[in-house]
Amino acid sequence: MSDNKSLAARRDRAVPRGVASSTAVYADRAENAEVWDVEGRRYVDFAGGIAVLNTGHRHPKIMAAVEEQLKRFTHTAFQVNPYESYIELCERLNERAPFSGDAKTILLTTGAEATENAIKVARAATGRSAVIAFVGAFHGRTLLASAMTGKVTPYKRKIGPMPPEVFHAPFPTGLDGNTVEKSLAAIQTLFAADVEPERVAAVIVEPVQGEGGFHVAPTEFLEALRALADQYGFLLIADEVQAGFGRTGKLFAIEHSGVEPDLVCTAKSLGGGFPLSGLIGRAPIMDALDPGGLGGTYGGSPIGCAASLAVLDVIEEEKLLDRATAVGERLSKRIAGFAAAGLPVANLRGLGAMVAFDVTNADGETDGVCAKAVSTAALEGGLILLTCGPKGETVRILVPLTASDAIIDEGLDIMEKALASVGGKVAA
């Protein structure tokens, strides 16, 4: 029988080192917010497959929908033999689009496909070529998506040059002097020094940065981007791949701001654990490309569509948007208590159940080494926990929204002990 050590050795021989894993725990089975490894050890899952499992591992309704689809057919390619579930899912997403007017949707497979197709559509619709993204952004690992991603290591290192006409401005994290005013001034500097606004096809922004550290885009910032897009005729793209599908207490995080984007990228929890992504946009914009200009062999697979339709039902029936708000409040209250008790916690932040904080060292500085030590200690205690941020200094929480309060509290207990092992002491 395989164990974690033997599988790690086989992995080293068979898999390129560029494919990184956060843990050396090899999964055997999972249910809701719990994972068991190949050695039979149980873990509380605060990672959710990196925001893929808002509805939990193997939700019964999603599994039943997939099993039913498996009995009928698994693949035809929508471009060859289309099928009703693709159309129905697009209809339901169009109804929930976070903008007014008619919408259309294309279904794809990965988040990077969604962001790259957003740029294709934006270029076709505007007749322009340039793109503005933000420092700290993560938009995927394919080449254009890597160019838009606002972090060199590890995403761009050794693979340059990047595709041209992608420009970056600071994201207003509220930390280290990165204010809304600074970000907007930097965009004006781009217009003066690098690219005229009339050549910009789109600005792409995460309403809550994912890999960048769970920083929430201020409403006034999103409003200013909308105003710039309207002024100069370019499009506003919301990358909701990590923040979407209920994680923040709204189906899409940008809904909290009231700002209407032109295009919305979605993936991860859209498929409830099955590969699926989508691009939702204003209908005239989405129709800018000619037939054949969009698509993909596996895009909008019948299995993914069946799963996603069930995901939408589960979100509604189990009131997961309200649950996300309650989970976020529970997490934030407890973590604030960690900080008050002297544990190495700083900059608690988030929106809904998309919660994060920075880990500090003995000098009170945010520290990626310390954050990694916390995640390692948490794993040893039975909690799967992820880090992110420019220096890896941030602990992020993506527990399934279907997790019980008891499971969440168990995970927080383990986290508290992990933080205490790095610095400070466990609260009495």
Image (cartoon, rainbow, N blue to C red):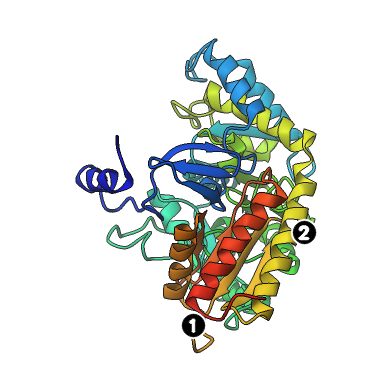
Does residue 308 appear left or right of residue 326 in this picture? left
In the image, farthest residue toward the front? 428
Q: Which residue lies under the disc numbered 2?
A: 257
| Real-space CA distance between mark 2 and mark 1, rounded to the nearest whole angstrom | 34 Å
Mark closer to the observer (2, 1): 1
The answer to whether residue 236 is above or below residue 371 is: above
Kindly identify the residue that appears in the image at 43 percent across and 70 percent down.
Answer: 373
Residue identifier under label 1: 361
Q: Position of residue 54 (x, y in %)?
A: 63, 44
| Total marks in image | 2
Q: Is residue 267 visible?
A: no
Upstream in sequence: badge 2 or badge 1:
2
* Circle 1 SS class: loop
Please give left or right for residue 320 compared with residue 111 in the image: right
* Residue 409, numbered circle: none
In the image, 90 versus 289, the foreground residue is 90
